[in-house]
Every structure is written in structure tokens, then in C-alpha cells.
Image: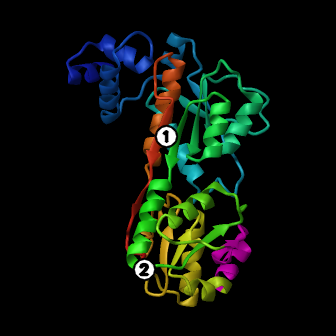
């Protein structure tokens, strides 16, 4: 683990400049600060949290406001990975992450807040202190962005539209006309559904309600439902998995009924199915860097705490990665 002096020696600058950049106290020009932070990450620098807290009179803690529903917060949930990535990113700035339960009556004992998705924004709206720096992590849709801006919060968001547009273009080139969607229960005005339909429409394709298949979250009935749906899924040219959590039971059911991918059914993932690249065959899917999203959110909230300028609107575009699950 590197020290401040080692970072300074690597860059040929003084230890004072490194200390200012890493603590957020004192002036360091932005380009130099970014270089110091990059080298600190490369050298695995970890600040002494207790020493920084004493020097800055801060708690060195960031509150995390997000949905704690077990159906979303599991091993296959993106929420779980977001927490891990945020914790790691904030640790590099000397901060720890504190989960704020839904029943929390206030926002004491923290220097700033990160709110994840609309549920996190709703939680923050009930307890927020306007003077406390806060940043939102969002899906880039009109409703989420509008809610963050109503709360006057900066945000970091991932935008799936570019990736979905690339997938729709691929469908058009391959002549995949009948596209279906497999999803957990969701309203028909769901932003993700609207994004998928809009991307398909750009290439002369459609997604009728009859080809949207909803399944329950209950593990006891999930596989049985998937087996029952298999004949209808075989009639599709492409099945899009609305959530990466659907991928695991889908592959299990496909194996049970002898549904081969992609020989019998082309398959694509709409969510950032980061673990499905290890499936057999790997799932072709939309992809963006959760690590980069969390790192930028962490930098934004720590910069806000330090009173420094930062980008208030950060957008990361998803891309489509073809891994061979589309024939």
C-alpha cells in the first residue's frame, strides 16, 4: 500500500500537493488533482480514515439511500454490486459507506449522501437536509432525471438507449422480426419497456403486448412458469430478458425442456447482465461499467463535500455486446 510520499515521488511533486488532493483541503488545480487521484488508485493508496476525520472534523461517512427489498438486494441483483463498487470507490477517498434504512428519521452522522434509483430518491426526500451534499445514481429516463432535478441533486446515470438501438439494428440486419420480452411483473408504462419499443420502432420492428411474458419472483414457481412458457418462446425470433435476474431461471428451464440457445431461440439481455458472460453460451447483452458509474458518483459527492467544482450531470452510455446467443 502506497504512502503520500511515494505518490509524490512518482509524480515529481511535493507531498503537500498530494495531501491537498487526497483530503480535499487546500487548492490544487483540477488537472493535477485528477492525475494525483489516478496514480493513488494505481498505487492502491488508502488514507487513514481516523486521521482524516480528526483533521477535517468530518465523520468520513457517506449515507446510502436505496431500496432494501430482498427481491432486489441479492447475489444476482445489480444493487448488490453497486453497493460493493460504491464502498470500494469511497474507500479510496477515505470514506466509509453507511446503509440508511427506510425507517431512518434523519441524516445525522454522515457528511454526504448517495441515493440509488427512484426508491432512494423517495427515501432521501423524506429525511434530506438541503445543506448536506447528495448525489443520485439513476437509470437515465425522463422520470428519474426529473425527480433528481426536482430535488436539486446532481446525478450519475447509465443510459441503455444506445445499446438497445444497436441491438434493434442487429435484429433488422438478421431479419429477426418477432421480438418478445421476458420480464418480472411491471406496469405497461415502465420506462424500460418504452425504451425497448422505441428502439425497435426505429428499425421497423414492434413489441406487442401478446409477446411480453411476465413471470413471478417466487423461486418455488419460477422454473415451472418458464417450462410452461417454452413453446410460446420457441415461436419468437428473439427473446429479450428484461432483467438480469431472469437469466438464471431461464437457462435452468431451457435446459430442462431441451431449448437450445441459440439454435432454437436467440437470446439477448436488456439489463447489464455482468455475470451472464460466463453462461453457456454467454448472453449477448447491453453492458456498461458499474465500476465507472460508482467511481464518478463517489468523486462527485466527495467533491461536493470539499466545496469543489464537479460535473453535476454524468451520463454513461451502455453498449451492446454480441457474445453468440443470437443466431
Question: Residue tagged by mark 2?
Answer: 175
State the SS at label 1: helix
Residue 155, picture quadrant: top right
Residue 257, picture quadrant: bottom right
Residue stretch in magenta = 209-227
Question: Residue tagged by mark 1?
Answer: 294
Left or right of 327, for residue 5 = left
Please name the residue shown 76% across and 26% down the image. 106
Q: Position of residue 49 (x, y in %)?
A: 50, 23
How many labels sit on residues?
A: 2
In the displayed structure, 299 sits above or below 157; it is above
Is residue 92 part of the magenta span, yes or no?
no
Left or right of 144, for residue 282 = left
> Which residue is nearer to you in this view: 203 or 215?
203
Q: Can you say which quadrant of the picture contains the N terminus?
A: top left
How far apart, in angstroms, are the residues tagged by discs 1 and 2?
Answer: 37 Å
Is residue 213 part of the magenta span, yes or no?
yes
Left or right of 1, for residue 106 = right
Q: Nearer the viewer, mark 1 or mark 2?
A: 2
Please name the residue shown 46% across and 82% down the image. 261
Please name the residue shown 44% across and 55% down the image. 162
Amino acid at each position: 500500500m502506497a504512502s503520500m510520499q511515494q505518490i509524490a515521488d512518482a509524480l515529481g511533486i511535493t507531498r503537500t500537493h498530494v495531501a491537498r488532493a487526497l483530503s480535499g483541503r487546500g487548492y490544487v488545480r483540477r488537472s493535477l488533482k485528477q492525475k494525483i487521484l489516478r496514480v493513488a488508485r494505481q498505487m492502491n493508496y488508502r488514507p487513514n480514515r481516523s486521521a482524516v476525520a480528526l483533521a477535517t472534523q468530518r465523520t468520513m461517512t457517506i449515507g446510502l439511500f436505496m431500496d432494501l427489498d430482498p427481491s432486489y438486494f441479492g447475489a444476482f441483483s445489480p444493487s448488490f454490486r453497486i453497493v460493493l463498487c460504491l464502498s470500494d470507490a469511497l474507500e479510496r477517498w477515505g470514506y466509509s459507506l453507511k446503509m440508511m434504512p427506510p425507517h431512518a428519521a434523519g441524516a445525522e452522522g454522515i457528511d454526504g449522501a448517495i441515493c440509488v434509483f427512484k426508491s432512494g430518491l423517495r427515501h432521501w426526500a423524506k429525511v434530506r437536509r438541503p445543506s448536506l451534499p447528495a448525489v443520485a445514481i439513476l437509470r437515465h429516463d425522463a422520470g428519474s432525471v426529473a425527480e433528481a432535478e426536482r430535488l436539486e441533486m446532481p446525478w450519475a446515470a447509465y443510459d441503455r438507449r444506445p445499446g438497445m438501438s444497436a441491438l434493434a439494428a442487429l435484429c433488422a440486419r438478421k431479419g429477426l422480426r418477432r421480438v418478445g420480452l421476458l420480464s418480472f411483473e411491471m406496469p405497461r408504462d415502465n420506462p424500460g419497456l418504452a425504451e425497448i419499443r422505441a428502439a425497435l420502432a426505429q428499425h421497423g420492428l414492434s413489441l406487442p403486448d401478446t409477446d411480453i411474458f411476465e413471470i413471478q419472483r417466487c423461486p418455488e414457481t419460477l422454473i415451472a412458469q418458464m417450462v410452461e412458457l417454452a413453446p410460446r418462446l420457441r415461436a419468437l425470433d428473439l427473446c429479450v430478458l428484461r432483467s438480469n435476474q431472469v437469466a438464471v431461471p431461464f437457462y435452468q428451464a431451457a435446459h430442462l425442456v431441451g431449448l437450445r440457445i441459440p439454435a432454437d431461440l436467440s437470446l439477448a439481455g436488456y439489463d447489464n447482465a455482468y455475470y451472464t458472460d460466463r453462461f453457456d453460451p454467454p448472453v449477448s447483452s447491453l453492458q456498461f461499467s458499474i465500476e465507472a458509474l460508482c467511481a464518478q458518483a463517489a468523486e462527485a459527492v466527495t467533491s461536493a463535500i470539499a466545496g469543489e467544482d464537479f460535473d453535476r450531470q454524468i451520463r454513461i452510455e451502455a453498449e451492446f455486446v454480441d457474445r453468440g446467443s443470437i443466431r
